[in-house]
Image (cartoon, rainbow, N blue to C red):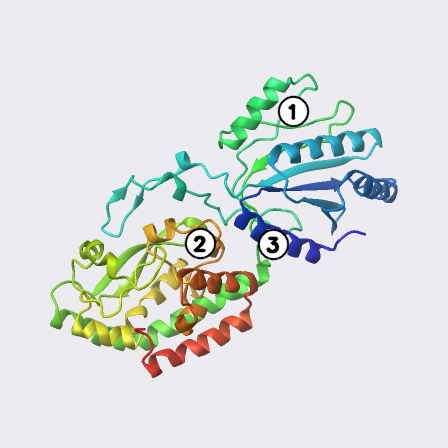
Amino acid sequence: MLLTRTEFNREVARERIRATRRSIPFCIVTIDVAGGRQLQVRRRALIRILHRNVRLTDQKAELGNNRFAVLLVDTPEMGGRSVLDRLASLCETRKIDATLSLRVHDPEGFDPDRDVDLPSGAGKRRRDDAPESSWLRVDRSSSDALGLAVQQRPAIIAETPRSPEVTSRDEDAMATATATGTARSLAHTPKHSSNHSAFVTCEALLSDRPLTRRLTKRAIDLAGASIGLVLVSPVLVVAGLAVKLTSPGPAFFKQTREGMGGKPFTIYKMRTMVVDAESKQSALRQKSHRDGPAFKIKHDPRVTPIGHLLRKTCIDELPQFINVLRGDMSLVGPRPLPWHESRACNHWQRRRLDVPPGMTCYWQVDKAAAETFDDWMRMDLQYVDRNDLWRDLRLIARTALVPLTGRGGE
């Protein structure tokens, strides 16, 4: 019995959550059967191969357009390569004209050497990030052509022919190069068919949303941010004058935050603290009432008198309509953390970066429900796994009530 594309996507998402929590890799093998004469015969032969040569615990699916896939649970890269080679050999023996590929998801396979220098909130460049905080960045502009809900960065391994005489030493070298992110070629072309090929990429497998939903969400963001920015412009002008008249320094505050896929961006807010607030944070760290890497302190002495009012009414967040228009943020999504706080999150918590950050989300409208930092992250992941347009509209409506009740500064 083969799963449908929707069922397989659900299994991939579930396995990815489990793999991230347990730090255990998994693999996906995809098989594209070529069209032409006797297509149905080759399809039936391939289905028999999958049922007889793949573990019962592995999920097998038909994705449509003569494409099949196998989810190899709890399987590292070398195990996936072994399955790939065996299936390619069986397809060659049965004269099944098909192209096979392997994709590996390894939660611990992040390469700290591939990190780049990024600006801090003060505009300086940092080189002191801890190696364990580095992780894989995903290029959202590159979509996987599979029927799977998988998105990837450009493949780091090119598809090139490999002769049958490749030695085990060469395979070990290529495996090491793949694990360390080095661009090395690897392909498997059986002797009698140039259409049988296999290539391996080590990359994160991320649940993707349908294109129509993403475009609709972006259209709502653009419309909502444009209308919102026009409506609140008088409020921002008054608030800016109030900030300038009551404390020295600029009216707006800029800070580097981590966005979707780990991409840094500059967030805009009304300044609610004294100018040198960030330099005083280390001295107040012990007073933070929030566990985990996030810094939250009740009755923060750095907040100015007008800043308390701006926070209570959420006016300080309104300049983020600019971030939404620029594409850095969405109206609804997990709140972006400051760069170094986000980098200090655990691997399973960083899955919140699979979607664009937003001006509001579950935590923003129900902060009391998040007693711990982990609770906050679970609320974000709940949105990542179950987001839809109607849910976004409900969260926007609930957010409108927050400043009316004065709970924005909680």
Circle 2 residue: 260
Query: Residue 187, percent across and down?
Result: 64, 28
Circle 3 residue: 13
Answer with left or right where residue 361 lies relative to residue 2.
left
Q: CA distance from mark 2 to mark 1?
A: 35 Å
Which callout, 3 or 2, points at the residue further toward the start of the chain?
A: 3
Q: Residue at x 50, y 38 (%)?
A: 109
Q: Nearer the viewer, residue 293 or 143?
A: 293
Q: CA distance from mark 3 to mark 2?
A: 18 Å
Which callout, 2 or 1, points at the residue further toward the start of the chain?
A: 1
Labelled pair 3, 1 in contact (Cβ < 8 Å):
no
Tag 3: amino acid: Ala
Density class for disc 1 (Cα within 10 Å; few <14, some 14-19, many ≥20) is some
Query: Residue 72, percent across and down?
Result: 67, 43
Which callout, 3 or 1, points at the residue further toward the start of the chain?
A: 3
Corner quadrant of residue 27: top right
Answer with left or right where residue 101 lies relative to residue 185.
right
What is the tally of numbered marks visible in this picture? 3
Circle 1 residue: 161
Q: In terms of secondary structure, where does tag 3 sit?
A: helix
Q: Residue furthest bottom?
A: 404
Residue 184 in view: no
Tag 1: amino acid: Pro
Query: Residue 102, percent across and down?
Result: 64, 38
Corner quadrant of residue 31: top right
